[in-house]
Image: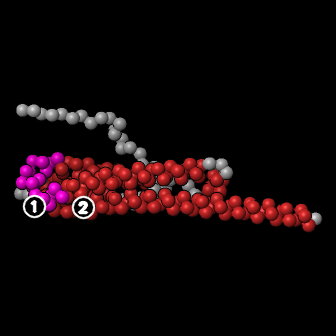
Amino acid sequence: MKKSLVIIIAIIAVAWLWIVGQYNGLVAGRASVDAAWSNVEVQYQRRSDIVPQLVATVEGAANFEKGTLTDVVEARAKATSVQVDPNNAESLKAFTAAQGELSGTLSRLLVTVEAYPTLTATQGFRDLQSQLEGTENRIAVARGDYNGVANAWNVKVSRVPTVFIARLLGFDRAALFDATPGSENAPKVEFNIQ
């Protein structure tokens, strides 16, 4: 009787230690996903912080297209107002769409600016343009890093037997960044040589 009680207690203790180990692993994994997501947000915030400086610099150019500047300011406001939950795919899509809209308006702004050689010649504008380009690269890297960590997390919470503990304790899969619709098509480049 005493021997079977010891065996039962040992089995319960081992099961408990296994559950605690699984839980701690899930907590650590979720923290890694959250940290990677935070790095993505930091880069988007960096870009958002550069936009007002860029707009103010461009605004100083005489007769600059005000509609383009208005589009950039509105896209920035929209991008910064979207609340995102990286665990929710729909929320992440809305966030990505708003950030994509900002990227598009910034691209149009930079193309439009080319018609103003005095503006593009100023050191302040060139510095901001360089910072923006660097930030876009940092965003791409941070998104790739996040997807890597989130993918590892998704594998972890999907494997047996961890999947049972994850579901029981409410650990869900993380949403991944998808490519922007249409990005699979190569852009058309035209050179107008006169």
Say few, some or many: other residues with alpha carbon within 10 Å of mark 1 (under 14 / 14 to 19 / 20 or more): few
- Identify which residue is drawn at 74% across, 60% down: 15
Residue 5 is left or right of residue 61, and the answer is right
The residue depicted at 10 percent of the width and 61 percent of the height is: 60
125 falls in the magenta region: yes
Marking on residue 60: 1
Q: Which mark is residue 121?
A: none
Pointer 2 residue: 50
Comparing labels 1 and 2, the label whose residue is closer to the camera: 2
Question: Which of the two residues, 74 or 16, is positioned nearer the viewer here?
Answer: 16
Residues tagged 1 and 2 counted as in contact (Cβ below 8 A): no
Q: CA distance from mark 1 to mark 2?
A: 16 Å
- Give the quadrant of the N terminus: bottom right
Three-letter residue code for mark 2:
Ile
Which secondary structure lies at badge 1? loop
Would residue 94 be visible to someone looking at this image? no
- Please name the residue shown 42% across and 61% down the image: 38
Q: Earlier in the sequence, mark 1 or mark 2?
A: 2
Q: Position of residue 124 (x, y in %)?
A: 14, 61
Task: Please provide percent x and percent y for residue 139.
Answer: 34, 54
The boundaries of the magenta stretch are 111-127
Q: Mark 1 belongs to which amino acid?
A: Gly
Looking at the image, residue 124 lies above or below residue 110: below
Q: Nearer the viewer, residue 126 or 80?
A: 126
The total of numbered circles placed on residues is: 2
- Position in image of residue 82 (x %, y %): 36, 59
Left or right for 12, reference 185: right
Which of the pair 171/28 is nearer the observer? 28
